[in-house]
Image: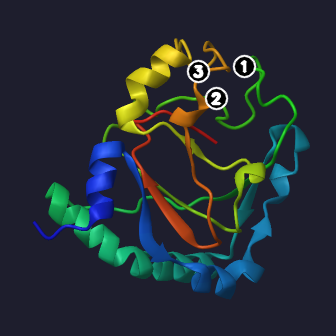
């Protein structure tokens, strides 16, 4: 009865913006991110960042502490424990062939992670993100059937790119904003 409206939105739509911002933690640690040397391949359009082990441990602890109220609400609502099992620091880059379904650089075609039904993701903006930055794009659960029909969706490499764009929600926002979504249950692309 006393659950946050964002948790209800997550349950109904498969995604929500959390009422938390972790900008202060990112600001504290951003100078400790470094590019993984073995990931300089420009063809991938994705760059991975690392941190020294102790810095990463402390960074994750502070992020978890900031997310704790939202995690507590999720645990109460779904009556189960939530475990943060992995943290990845990445940057995706814009590419000119983003509408070419024959080329996929980093999960940039609509798909669902249906192989992990109890797996959810929290995207934390490591910078201000607008529509020109290539934000995460999400199809809310209530738009799923309309999306499949409008885009004539068959699978991640076989759909019409000219479907109804109003069905797509974009994870734009400020540095530190957090977006929770159910990657197995909703269509999304990076």
Residue 115 in view here: no
- Answer left or right for 127 relative to 122: right
Residue 41 location in percent, x, y? 88, 44
Question: Secondary structure under badge 1?
Answer: loop
Given residues 130 and 44, the one toward you in this image is: 130
Residue 170, percent across and down? Answer: 59, 48
Depth check: 117 or 124 in front?
124
Q: Is residue 64 above or below residue 5?
A: below
Of the numbered discs 2 and 3, the one sitting upstream in the chain is 2
Identify residue for label 3: 156
Image point (64%, 35%), residue name: 107
Read off the residue under disc 1: 101
15 relative to 47 in the view: left or right: left
Whichever of labels 3 and 1 marks the residue nearer the N terminus, that label is: 1
Marks 2 and 3 close (CB-CB < 8 Å): yes
Going 68% across and 84% down the picture, which residue do you hit? 27
**Mark 3 Cα shell of 10 Å, populated few (<14), some (14-19), many (≥20):** some
For the residues labelled 2 and 1, the Cα–Cα distance comes to 7 Å
Q: Which residue is mark 2?
A: 109
Instruction: State if disc 1 and disc 3 touch (CB < 8 Å).
Output: yes
Mark 2 crowdedness (10 Å alpha carbons): few <14, some 14-19, many ≥20: many
Could you tell me how far apart the alpha carbons at marks 2 and 3 are, in whole angstroms? 6 Å
Q: Nearer the viewer, residue 16 or 185?
A: 16
Q: Quadrant of the N terminus?
A: bottom left
For residue 145, which quarter of the picture? Answer: top left
Would you place residue 144 above or below residue 120 in this image? above
Q: Position of residue 6 (x, y in %)?
A: 33, 62
State the CA–CA distance, disc 3 to disc 1.
8 Å
Q: Is residue 139 above or below residue 76?
A: above
Q: What percent of the width, then of the height, locates residue 31?
A: 77, 82
């Amino acid at each position: 009865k006393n659950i946050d409206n964002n948790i209800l939105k997550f349950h109904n739509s498969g995604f929500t913006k959390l009422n938390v911002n972790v900008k202060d933690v990112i600001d504290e640690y951003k100078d400790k991110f470094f590019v993984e040397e073995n990931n300089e391949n420009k063809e991938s359009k994705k760059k991975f960042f690392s941190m020294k082990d102790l810095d990463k441990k402390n960074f994750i602890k502070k992020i978890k502490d900031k997310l704790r109220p939202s995690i507590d609400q999720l645990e109460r609502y779904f009556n189960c424990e939530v475990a943060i099992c992995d943290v990845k620091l990445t940057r995706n880059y814009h590419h000119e062939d983003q509408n070419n379904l024959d080329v996929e650089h980093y999960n940039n075609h609509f798909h669902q992670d249906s192989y992990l039904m109890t797996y959810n993701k929290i995207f934390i903006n490591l910078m201000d993100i607008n529509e020109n930055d290539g934000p995460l794009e999400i199809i809310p659960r209530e738009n799923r059937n309309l999306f499949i029909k409008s885009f004539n969706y068959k699978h991640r490499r076989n759909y019409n790119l000219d479907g109804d764009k109003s069905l797509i929600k974009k994870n734009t926002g400020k540095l530190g904003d957090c977006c929770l979504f159910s990657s197995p249950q909703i269509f999304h692309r990076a």
